[in-house]
Amino acid sequence: MPPYIYPASASALLSFSDLCVDPSSSNTVILADATQARSKFRNALKDVEARNADWLIVLDAVQGYLPYLLGTINSLEADDLLQRNDPLFPWKSIVTSPSMGTSSLANLPAFGSELVMTLTCYAAALCNLAYDTLRDPLAGTRSAGPRDRQPMTSSADDKRKVDKMAQAADMLCRASGVFDYVAQTVLPAWEARIADSTDGKSGAFRIGKGKAKMPGEFSRDVQRALSMLALADANAIGIEKLLSPFHANITFQSTRLPLPKGHPSPGLLAKLHIEVATLYSSSRTLLKTIKNSKSSALEGLNIDDDIEPSLMEYLRKEWAIAEVRSRKWLAVEAGENASGEKVGQAIAMLKDAKIRLEELRKHGDIGTSTMKKMKGLKIGLGSGGKEAKTERKSRITQEMADIESFLETYTHMNNTVSFQPIPPISSVQALMPGGRPIFSAKPFTLPVPAFGPGSATYSPPVRKGPINPDAAQEIASPAIRHETPGTYAGAGNYF
């Protein structure tokens, strides 16, 4: 059930004073503050993995650390700070699994790598916080689909739940923007710096054929796929929110026709689900083709393509459910045609949806016998356990009840009134329209650095003694552009 839950990343303790030289001695306290902010971020990730904290703590910690990281990168670029050595940042991937016999922490080169992983953790924290928001007891029982099938107890409960869905969708749109920013801006800059530093002169971390693999987070296609995934989840929640006014009138019995007054148009619902299915499918395709695609402009970059199985399973599962629902609502649109001329078409669509759902429930397959098994619908999310399995069964049961009810209604109508031919199921795909989104990704911009170039109170430091140009071998991303205070995505939203 959307949204996808990311595993917690992990890192090791680092000291910025050990990584950087301060020629002017004016940033000593700032470097200590940066170390403390990173330690808080690292400890928050550790605590949330041990279930001693929640994702709100992680989000607060990463938002506190990011300005210090940006200040360090910009200060290194301006030579206000110098690197002692070529830095390595240990990080655990959240999208790829380490090879057998290797450490879960990969040593990543340059401050640019730290920025990639920090922003990825930021986006993942937004996604996980969206999930937790929907599970908030004050928001009502966690939905098992676009309808709870459980009557609301009061209008206040109804409004509270709608507000929670809106908050969750907003977080996911923000997360989509962060993932996209990493793909479009941060990774290209990081690749350029790494390419400059692997000329054999600087002694920098070498990346190439046969060398250490970089986590999947360093593939542009992976970041694009994660952006699509977050956006698909946001739109799926948006559909649930659109249908929320009708929850109170729906029980575990199937939906009745005709639909209640004011119910969203079946054609609109179908297009919304088609958009969700398209996003899930596109995300899955990008992740499946990493091996055969050049997802980085850096020649020889060895990206780990062993994507977490739970992520691939989730994408297959949610794509399948969205496909079934799009056919169901297209069938209702055709069946409710006043002239009755499309009842046969409605029956074909419902039969197609029923076959897909039966295969999904019985074998974990979807569509045709050549499709791979939908393991995600059998075992749920890797961390979902019994709850995820229960939600999956509930959603399939609900969809099957709707489809069988609609199919019975339209079959009777066709046999007694309309007498329309029923087209073959193979023709259904050609009748599918284009999708329509509810939400789009929210553009992300970096916050103002805590110090150094670009900060609110920056003035070039007075250096003590000459500077050795060879000592400064900064290989992070170029000087980071920033927005004025209050204009970046999420400004003031520190929860």
Image (cartoon, grey):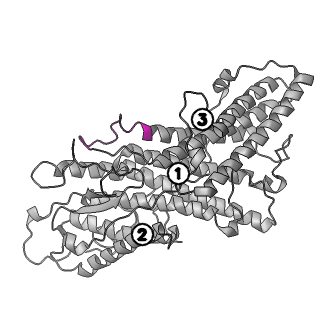
Which residue occupies the foreground of this view, 211 or 134?
211
Query: Sequence order check: which comes first, mark 1 or mark 3?
Result: 1
Q: Is residue 83 positioned above or below 228 on the image?
A: below
Residue stretch in magenta = 287-302
Residue 79 is left or right of residue 447, and the answer is: left
At label 3, the amino acid type is Asp
Please name the residue shown 69% across and 70% down the image. 138
Q: Work out whether 487 lies above or below 422.
A: below
Amino acid marked by disc 2: Lys
Image position, residue 274 (x, y; %): 62, 38
User: Nearer the viewer's eye, disc 1 or disc 3?
Assistant: 3
Whether 398 is drawn above or below 491: the answer is above
Res 406 → quadrant: top right
Which mark identifies residue 365?
A: 3
Q: Which tag is nearer the camera, tag 2 or tag 1?
A: 2
The answer to if 301 sits in the magenta stretch is yes
The residue carrying mark 2 is 46
Q: Is residue 466 left or right of residue 209?
A: left
Q: Is residue 494 magenta?
A: no
Q: Residue at x 69, y 23 (%)?
A: 425
| Furthest residue in direction right, as rendered | 416
